[in-house]
Image (cartoon, rainbow, N blue to C red):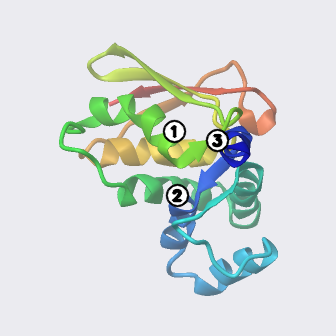
Amino acid sequence: MGDQSEQQQKNEYSGAALTSFIVALADSQGIVDKLLADAGVESIDPEAWYDYDWAVSFFYKIEAQLGKAAIASVGRSMIEAAVYPPEIDGVKALLASLGHWFALNARGPEVGTILCEFEDDHSAIIDNSARGPCSLNIGIIEAACARYGTVPLIEHGTEGCKDDGAPTCIYRVSW
């Protein structure tokens, strides 16, 4: 019983979601191997759960070493690799489900959330308090829209950015 209570108190990130960086950087196996070695692991087990802080720092290392475009590509890979139920049939449905999708890949009392509120049929406000690089979130939003043939306009709110220590990033997404 103590193990279950302890498990619920830990902040963890899914190995399956973490492996998205390998897919995004598939053409650069040497870089993948170095990133893993620098992180002290040989591979990421898609069936395992990893310490959330470690996972977040790993994403920041990818961004620091390879740039914002590389970590945005990782975010796009996460969406591209995911399996969706039939009711996720368009941009609006997928954006609305991002919070649920995140909750399937991150667990614990302090992992943050992704909230989506629609302004109309073609725009939404996304409030993302899940820790990690802002560029990762932008890649996720881009891929959610691209999955249905849409190129979104993503405007970052002026209230602050998690990359600079703010508790959340707010995005206005239009498609």
Q: Residue at x 64, y 41 (%)?
A: 134
Front-lying residue, 155 or 23: 23
Q: Secondary structure at mark 3?
A: helix
Task: Please tell me how crowded label 3 is: few (under 14), some (14-19), or many (20+) other residues with Cα within 10 Å.
Answer: many
Residue 9 versus residue 170 in the image, above or below = below
Nearer to us of marks 1 and 3 is 1
Amino acid marked by disc 1: Ala
Q: Earlier in the sequence, mark 2 or mark 3?
A: 2
Task: Please tell me how crowded label 1 is: few (under 14), some (14-19), or many (20+) other residues with Cα within 10 Å.
Answer: some
Task: Please tell me how crowded label 2 is: few (under 14), some (14-19), or many (20+) other residues with Cα within 10 Å.
Answer: many
Structural distance between the alpha carbons of marks 1 and 2: 11 Å
Where residue 92 appears, as percent x and y from the top left, is: 29, 29
Q: Residue at x 67, y 20 (%)?
A: 158
- Residue at the far bottom: name it: 30
Q: Secondary structure at mark 2?
A: helix
- Residue at the far top: name it: 119
Quadrant for the C terminus in the image: top left
Quadrant for the N terminus in the image: top right
Where residue 164 appears, as percent x and y from the top left, is: 80, 35
In the picture, measured across the screen, residue 78 lies left or right of residue 36, that is: left
State the residue position of label 3. 134
Front-lying residue, 167 or 124: 167
Structural distance between the alpha carbons of marks 1 and 3: 18 Å
Where residue 68 appears, as percent x and y from the top left, is: 64, 54
**Label placed on residue 17:** 2
How many labels sit on residues? 3
**Label placed on residue 103:** 1
Quarter of the image where one finds residue 8: top right
Amino acid marked by disc 2: Ala
Quarter of the image where one finds residue 50: bottom right
